[in-house]
């Protein structure tokens, strides 16, 4: 008989008035990025409020794996990380680079340059976190 291990819950992302639109869209399964219409600059900055004239817009959710690491053990004691998992940097089709995990049945077969698409992982309390799956088709 095996002992039951109670894992701590996955971390919830920090929310603020600066990023509330991002997290509200994520609950609906939409990935938002920020754009400055006057210059066309696109970015992902969840720590700072939108500058005057900037706007949120819905991204395609597509990208390419820039780099990745397969995490095989806890990164710190008492963290909710559940190794193994794939941590990656994703070059989004719109330009910005986004840190996220690669999830799904083909996650551990990931390679630099793989095409990926955004999916949303429910973390509880109505929070969905953007993650990516390999786009094999």
Image (cartoon, helix red, strand yellow):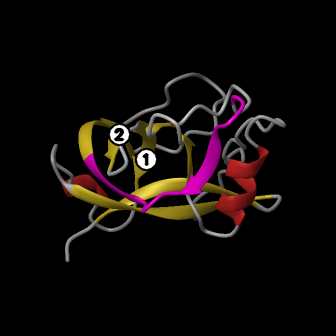
Q: Which mark is residue 72?
A: none
User: On residue 88, which mark appears?
Assistant: 2
Report if residue 123 is visible in the image.
no
Q: Which residue is painted at 48% across and 65% down in the image?
A: 119
Q: Quadrant of the N terminus?
A: bottom right
Residue 40 coordinates in the image, percent (x, y): 44, 40
Which element type, helix, strand or loop, lies under badge 2?
A: strand
Q: Residue at position x 19%, y 56% from top?
A: 109
Identify the residue at image location x=83%, y=58%: 125
N-terminal label among 1 and 2: 2
99, 97: nearer the viewer: 97
**Is mark 1 in CB contact (under 8 Å) with mark 2?**
yes
Quadrant showing the C terminus: bottom left
Q: Quadrant of residue 55?
A: top right
Count residues near mark 2 (Cα–Cα under 10 Å), then give few for <14, some for 14-19, many for 20+: many
x and y percent of residue 124 in the render? 76, 60
Question: What residue would you read off at disc 1?
Answer: 101
Residue range highlighted in magenta? 51-64
């Amino acid at each position: 008989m095996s002992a039951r291990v109670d894992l701590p819950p996955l971390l919830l992302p920090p929310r603020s008035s600066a990023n509330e639109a991002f997290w509200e869209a994520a609950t609906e399964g939409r990935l938002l990025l920020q754009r400055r219409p006057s210059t066309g600059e696109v970015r992902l900055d969840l720590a700072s409020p939108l500058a005057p004239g900037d706007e949120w817009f819905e991204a395609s959710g597509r990208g390419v794996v820039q780099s990745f690491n397969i995490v095989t053990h806890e990164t710190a004691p008492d963290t909710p990380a559940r190794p193994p998992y794939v941590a990656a940097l994703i070059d989004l089709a719109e330009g910005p680079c986004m840190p996220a995990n690669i999830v799904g049945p083909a996650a551990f077969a990931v390679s630099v340059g793989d095409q990926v698409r955004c999916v949303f992982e429910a973390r509880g309390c109505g929070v969905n976190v953007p993650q990516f799956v390999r786009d094999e088709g």
